[in-house]
């Protein structure tokens, strides 16, 4: 039996390669609003937190903050479908996890509309038993609330869950919620960035999660078969 019964995933930087689009959207927003530019490294430090948290230091009023968020989202959505893609091996990984009978969930700081659009565009629609977005909680990563919300929905014990993510915010959120945390190294951050969070597991490639869960090649093959259709 696998050591975990549920796998929770972060979205951007973990399942989907969208980091360049995210960074370009931040740069575009500051430029449009006449604000001093920031480096990619500066923006990456906040990756995994909601937009309003990222833009808070530039807004002196709620209207200014909403204006920044609106500019970001407009640019991001206009380029989203062409620039977002799954990391290699992710689709087979998710299919194999589900074929093995484990439950899956998404815990992201992206808003609900953008999350479901992203899942649809990359072919992951319908692969998650629960989706917790920024719209579903008041407190966001690194707070444990998003992970706890997923556990509540699935009626899961923390001991039965592993949270897979790419950022320190994912690791802190999962750790505070009491679940195991697995740091992926195929995203934008390297081991040196994440090691201070002391992940329970390191994943260099998506296939490493299958080995962790004791899911073999047969599960990957079976997940790619179509179920036979029956006629009434």
Image: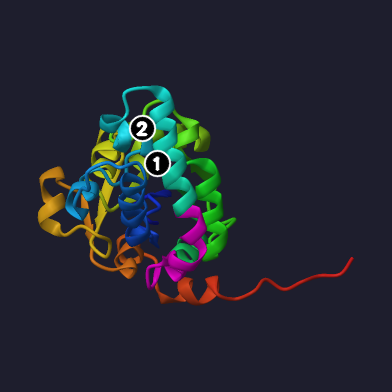
Q: Secondary structure at mark 2?
A: loop
User: Contact (CB < 8 A) between labels 2 and 1?
Assistant: yes
Image mark for residue 140: 2
Q: Residue lying farthest right? A: 232
Residue appearing at x 20%, y 48% in the figure:
38
Between residues 228 and 147, which one lies in front from this camera angle? 147
Region in magenta: 76-93
Work out whether mark 2 precedes mark 1 in sequence or the reverse, and give the earlier one.
1
Rounded to the nearest whole Å, what is the CA distance between mark 2 and mark 1? Answer: 7 Å
* Relative vertical location of residue 195 with respect to residue 206 in this rendering, above or below: above
Q: Which residue is mark 1?
A: 109
Q: Is residue 223 magenta?
A: no
Q: Residue lying farthest top? A: 61
* Observer able to see residue 59: yes
Residue appearing at x 55%, y 65% in the figure:
123
Q: Quick check: 3 left or right of 134?
A: left
């Amino acid at each position: 039996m696998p050591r975990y019964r549920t796998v929770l995933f972060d979205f951007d930087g973990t399942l989907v390669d969208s980091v360049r689009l995210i960074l370009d959207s931040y740069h575009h927003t500051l430029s449009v609003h006449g604000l001093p530019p920031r480096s990619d490294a500066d923006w990456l430090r906040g990756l995994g937190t909601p937009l309003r948290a990222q833009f808070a230091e530039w807004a002196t009023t709620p209207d200014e903050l909403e204006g920044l968020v609106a500019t970001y989202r407009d640019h991001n959505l206009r380029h989203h479908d062409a620039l977002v893609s799954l990391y290699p091996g992710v689709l087979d990984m998710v299919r194999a996890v589900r074929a093995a009978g484990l439950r899956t969930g998404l815990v992201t700081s992206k808003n609900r509309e953008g999350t479901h659009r992203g899942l649809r565009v990359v072919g992951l629609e319908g692969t998650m038993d629960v989706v917790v977005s920024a719209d579903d909680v008041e407190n966001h990563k690194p707070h444990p609330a998003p992970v706890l919300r997923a556990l509540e929905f699935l009626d899961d014990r923390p001991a039965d869950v592993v949270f897979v993510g790419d950022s320190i915010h994912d690791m802190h959120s999962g750790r505070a919620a009491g679940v195991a945390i697995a740091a992926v190294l195929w995203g934008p951050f390297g081991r040196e960035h994440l090691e201070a969070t002391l992940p329970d597991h390191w994943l260099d490639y998506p296939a490493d999660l299958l080995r962790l869960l004791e899911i073999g090649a047969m599960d990957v093959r079976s997940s790619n078969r179509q179920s036979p259709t029956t006629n009434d």
